[in-house]
Image: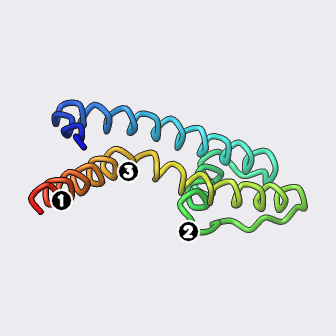
Amino acid sequence: MRHAPLPPPRVFALHLLRNLGITAVLVAASLGLGAAGYHEFAGLPWLDATLNASMILTGMGPVDPLTTPAAQVFGIAYSLFSGVAFLSITAILLAPAVHRLLHRFHLERAKAGAED
């Protein structure tokens, strides 16, 4: 059974750059959504709202307490969203490197199997 060779480093770098761009857009959109929610529902100034959103998005926890029920419901929803978003964004960013790593292992195993 013949396997495709690894793509050249230039193609790998382009895949990394593409996924970096995708993750940058997703992080910016997630951060914007969180900052807008904290600004609207918790009445925080934009800088404080962005700080809270970034802390929640990275899993570190909120900075300012949420005192109104609407703000607390938003905080719950945004925290749940952020957990899934952070893991998904990380997976998108790392996908080309993991793919290349798995490709290398498969080729090494195929070479070893051919010699046996």
Name which residue lies at 59% across and 38% down: 29
Residue 30, position in %: x, y? 61, 44
Mark 1 or mark 3: name the one nearer the start of the chain. Answer: 3
Residue 106, position in %: x, y? 26, 54
Give the labeled residue for mark 2.
60
Residue 82, position in %: x, y? 63, 55
CA distance separating discs 1 and 3: 29 Å
Give the labeled residue for mark 3.
94
CA distance separating discs 2 and 1: 47 Å
Which residue sits furthest front? 116
Q: Which of the 4 image quadrants contains residue 21? A: top left
Q: Nearer the viewer, mark 3 or mark 2?
A: 3
CA distance separating discs 3 and 2: 21 Å
In contact (CB < 8 Å): disc 2 and disc 1: no
In the image, residue 88 sits, relative to residue 75, either above or below, namely above
| Amino acid type shown at disc 1 | Gly
Name which residue lies at 66% across and 46% down: 35
Taking the image as shown, residue 74 lies to the left or right of residue 87, namely right
Disc 3 secondary structure class: helix
Q: Nearer the viewer, mark 2 or mark 1?
A: 1
Name which residue lies at 76% across and 59% down: 75
Q: Which mark is residue 113?
A: 1
| Amino acid type shown at disc 3 | Leu
Mark 2 or mark 1: name the one nearer the start of the chain. Answer: 2
Mark 3 or mark 2: name the one nearer the start of the chain. Answer: 2
Query: From the image, which quarter does the C terminus lie in?
Result: bottom left
In the image, 68 versus 57, the foreground residue is 57
Taking the image as shown, residue 96 lies to the left or right of residue 66, namely left
Disc 2 secondary structure class: loop
